[in-house]
Image (tube, rainbow, N blue to C red):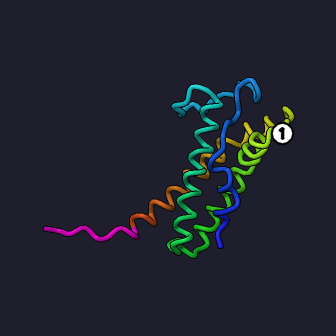
Amino acid sequence: MPMVLPRLKFLTLFSLVVCGAVGCASVPANSQHDSFADYAESVFRHQSALLSRLMMLSEAEQLPDNEAFENAEQTMHDACHLLNEYAERESDGEHMGLRFKAKVQASIEGCDASIQKMEALMSGLDQEQAPPHAHP
């Protein structure tokens, strides 16, 4: 079974990375976000939506059982684990040290890239499952 389910409990939370709490890290150059906090929250929400979609496909038994798909999912899980851990700690009201927060900041772009790769694989699924277009 894929790694889809472990982080779904975080779908309803997220008040992530306030600039004062984490420091004012820079936003990637190609980003449309005004602040690092906005970027981090956007990445978390994107991952949550993708995990929700993966869970629905898994429950419907529509996920491919192939190594490339499982590797992409595991890569996303690994790349986003610090962001997810931050969100869980934030939700629990735990204090986090500056070193941990810096690690979270450093991991966001890799997490975002892995989410985009997983999403690209999933868009291929959508095309495979779409009914053929009728030609006039």
Residue identifier under label 1: 94
Q: Is residue 78 above or below residue 1?
A: above
Q: Nearer the viewer, residue 30 or 122?
A: 122
On the image, the x and y values in percent for residue 3 come to 67, 65
In the image, taking residue 123 as reference, residue 34 lies left or right, namely right
Residue depicted at x 70% and y 60%? 6
Say how many tags the image has. Answer: 1
- 86 or 104, which is in the foreground? 86
Describe residue 85's horizontal placement relative to residue 95 as left or right: left
Say which residue appears at 58% left-offset and 39% top-offset. Answer: 42
Instruction: Give the camera-side residue of 30 and 94.
Output: 94
For badge 1, the amino acid type reads Glu
Q: Who's the residue at 66% across and 46% down the image?
A: 110
Vertical placement of 108 versus 64: above or below? above
Q: Position of residue 111 (x, y in %)?
A: 65, 47
Q: Position of residue 39 (x, y in %)?
A: 60, 35
In percent of the image, x 75 and y 46: which residue is there?
A: 88
Secondary structure under the numbered disc 1 in the rendered image:
loop
Q: Main secondary structure of the magenta part?
A: loop
Q: Is residue 121 above or below residue 44?
A: below
Crowd band around label 1 with a 10 angstrom C-alpha radius: few (<14), some (14–19), many (20+): few
Q: Quadrant of residue 4?
A: bottom right
Start-end of magenta stretch? 128-136
- Residue 119 shown left or right of residue 107 in the figure: left
**Image location (x, y in percent) of residue 20:** 74, 23
Residue 131 among those drawn in magenta:
yes
Q: Is residue 71 left or right of residue 102?
A: left
Image vertical order of residue 1 relative to residue 51, above or below? below
